[in-house]
Image (cartoon, grey):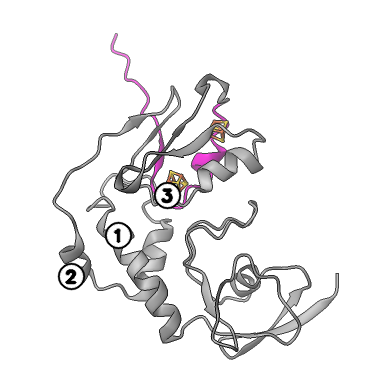
C-alpha cells in the first residue's frame, strides 16, 4: 500500500491509500465525533456525526471517505457544528437522564462526543421531553436492552452481520418508538456477546446473575 499526505484541520498527516479520513484522523490523535463507527465494522455513515467540510464547502462523512493525496478537510467549522450539534443535543435529550448504573460508565462514546462539542447541559434540559421511561427489554437469557440509553447507532445490528455473519438484530418501530430487537428466530443467537462488546453506550447489558438462596 502506498502512503498519501492529507491535511486535517491544518495538520499534515500520512495515511495508507484506501484508509478512510476518520480512521486516519483517529490514528493521528485528531478526534472527530462518531457513534456508528467501529474499526472492525464496515462503515455505514448512519449517525452523521463525523461530517467534515471539504475545500468546496460540501459536507461529507469522514467514515466513508477514502483519503485522496493532497486533500484538505476541516472538521471544526461553523458549518459542521451547525449540522451535528442539534443531532447530539436531541440524542442526549432523549437519553436516560442519569449515568448511575450504566454499564458504559467511564467508556461512553456519547460522553466523549458531548465533551468534545462542549454541549450546553442547561439547553439540553430544556429540550428534554416529559419523563416517560421505557421498560427494559429482556432480549434473551444472556442480555437485556435499554431503549432509554440506546442511541440507535446500529453498531450491534452491524456487528451481528459483519462479525458473527448472521442478521438477527434489526431496528423495529418508528419515530421515538424505534428500538433494536430480534427479528425472526432469536433462538439462533449464540450469545457470542460481540454486539455488547461494541455498543458505544449502555444500550445492551449482561443480565445480572440470579442470586441463588440455599
Ligand atoms: S450475541 Fe452474537 S449472535 Fe447474538 S445478537 Fe449479538 S452478535 Fe448476534
Ligand atoms: S444497543 Fe448500542 S450498539 Fe445497538 S443501536 Fe443501541 S446504542 Fe447502538
Q: Which residue is mark 1?
A: 92
Q: Position of residue 168 (x, y in %)?
A: 55, 31
Tell me the tag on residue 122.
2
**Sequence-first disc among 2 and 1:** 1
Is the CB atom of the residue marked by disc 2 within 8 angstroms of ligand 2's nearest atom? no
**Sequence-first disc among 3 and 1:** 1
Report the residue at 17% width, 55% height from top.
129
Q: Closer to us: mark 3 or mark 1?
A: 3
Other residues around mark 3 within 10 Å, as few (<14) / some (14–19) / many (≥20): many
Q: Is 41 covered by the magenta stretch?
A: no
Q: Position of residue 196 (x, y in %)?
A: 49, 40
Q: Is 193 covered by the magenta stretch?
A: yes
Report the residue at 55% width, 81% height from top.
58
Nearest the camera: 104 or 182?
Answer: 182
Q: Is residue 75 above or below residue 185?
A: below
Q: Is residue 151 left or right of residue 2?
A: left
Image quarter in which the N terminus is found: bottom right
Is the CB atom of the residue marked by disc 3 within 8 angstroms of ligand 2's nearest atom? yes
In the rendered structure, which segment of residues is drawn in magenta? 191-214
**Quadrant position of ligand 1:** top right
Q: Is residue 190 left or right of residue 4?
A: left
Q: Main secondary structure of the magenta part?
A: loop
Using the numbered discs, state the Cα–Cα distance from disc 3 to disc 2 in whole angstroms: 24 Å
Other residues around mark 1 within 10 Å, as few (<14) / some (14–19) / many (≥20): many
Q: Which residue is mark 3?
A: 152
Amino acid at each position: 500500500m502506498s502512503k498519501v499526505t492529507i491535511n486535517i484541520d491544518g495538520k499534515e498527516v500520512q495515511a495508507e491509500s484506501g484508509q478512510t479520513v476518520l480512521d486516519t484522523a483517529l490514528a493521528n490523535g485528531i478526534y472527530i465525533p462518531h457513534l456508528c463507527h467501529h474499526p472492525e465494522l464496515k462503515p455505514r455513515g448512519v449517525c452523521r456525526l463525523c461530517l467534515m467540510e471539504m475545500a468546496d464547502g460540501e459536507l461529507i462523512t469522514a467514515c466513508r471517505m477514502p483519503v485522496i493525496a493532497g486533500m484538505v478537510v476541516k472538521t471544526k467549522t461553523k458549518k459542521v457544528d451547525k449540522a451535528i450539534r442539534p443531532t447530539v443535543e436531541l440524542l442526549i435529550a432523549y437519553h436516560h437522564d442519569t449515568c448511575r448504573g450504566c454499564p458504559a460508565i467511564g467508556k461512553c462514546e456519547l460522553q466523549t462526543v458531548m465533551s468534545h462539542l462542549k454541549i450546553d447541559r442547561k439547553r439540553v434540559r430544556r429540550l428534554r421531553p416529559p419523563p416517560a421511561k421505557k421498560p427494559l427489554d429482556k432480549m434473551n437469557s444472556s442480555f437485556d436492552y435499554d431503549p432509554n440509553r440506546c442511541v440507535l447507532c446500529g453498531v450491534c445490528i452491524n456487528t451481528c452481520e459483519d462479525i458473527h455473519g448472521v442478521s438477527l438484530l434489526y431496528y423495529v418501530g418508528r419515530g421515538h418508538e424505534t428500538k433494536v430487537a430480534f427479528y425472526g428466530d432469536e433462538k439462533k443467537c449464540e450469545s457470542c456477546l460481540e454486539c455488547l462488546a461494541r455498543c458505544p453506550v449502555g444500550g445492551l447489558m449482561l443480565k445480572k446473575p440470579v442470586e441463588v438462596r440455599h
